[in-house]
Amino acid sequence: MTISSMTGFGRSSGRSGAWSWAWEIRTVNSKGLDLRLRLPPGFDAIDAEARAAISAVLRRGACHANLTAIRENAGADIRINRAALESLIGELAQTPLNANVRPASLDGLLAVRGIVDYREADDDEAVQAALNKDILAGLRTALDAVVAMRCSEGAAIGAVLVDRVARIAELSLQAEATPGRGAEAVKARIARQIDALGHTQGLDPARLHQEAVLLAARADIREELDRLAAHAKAASELLGKGGAIGRRLDFLAQELGRESNTLCAKSNDAALTAIGLDLKVEVEQFREQVQNIE
């Protein structure tokens, strides 16, 4: 399976009888599937099927799907309410006019609300069914374009994420191999610090070793290294598997961040701290890219 991003665009258009229509679909990042479908008046019948078609191919992302439909050269049914028109003319005939008011004209009378009833001709059921079928087919075409764009961008992001995971695993190995982690190294640092302060006389070597062991135990990062390796392996497997893995990768990114922060907090060696800071940078960049994955 491929990896998809949550950014995509698709458009399709066509004609069906006297109608011309066009779909435009845009998707951006979101925690879940946030579908916003806009249909023109008279097309409510396809709402449920359109939503189902979109939900079938998109798992995450804010999706804005807009349909425009225009009927061209459509006939119209025009009716004049003669009773209302005659009543209005009768009332005007009995109304005295001064010199500043002109007599009512026919176009003025017809403009009065309720005198003329204008209705577009309705399509029969067969024509409407054919139109709905064509529009839904157009929706699937636009969705294909959205999916293709999301897959293309997802492949590029996936390659970046693979590199990030490999770098995280590499830095974890470097941290494990850091010489300054051991008790003897801690003991040597303590001795140097004490020597620099001029308090070497009367120093008990056994006590020095004991303190070094305690400090090394408190600064032990064995568990953090094991979890970093496990999370990096899980992320690598997910990237190889593909599909809708964004949420699981986001969880692993949080866990990787937690372990790298703890590693830095426990570090008692400059080289290890430098590795920990590099780890934090890689994890943060990994997390940022994961936000784009479906």
Image: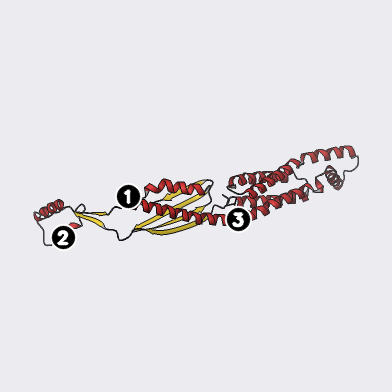
> What kind of residue is marked 2?
Leu
Which residue corresponds to mark 2?
Answer: 106
- The residue lying toward the viewer, choosing from 205 and 77, is 77
Q: Which colour scheme is used?
A: secondary structure
Q: Which mark is residue 125?
A: 1
Q: Tag 3, which secondary structure?
A: helix
Q: How far apart are marks 1 and 3 (CA)?
A: 45 Å
Along the horizontal axis of the image, is 40 left or right of 283? left
- Image quadrant in which you'd find residue 121: bottom left
Q: Residue at x 42, y 59 (%)?
A: 13
Sequence-wise, the earlier of marks 1 and 3 is 1
Q: How far apart are marks 2 and 3 (CA)?
A: 68 Å
Q: Tag 2, which secondary structure?
A: helix
Along the horizontal axis of the image, is 174 left or right of 136? right
Residue 235 place in picture, x, y as percent: 66, 47
Q: Residue 231 carries which label?
A: none
> What kind of residue is marked 3?
Ala
Along the horizontal axis of the image, is 33 left or right of 116? right
> What kind of residue is marked 1?
Glu
- Image quadrant in which you'd find residue 107: bottom left
Residue 167 place in picture, x, y as percent: 71, 53
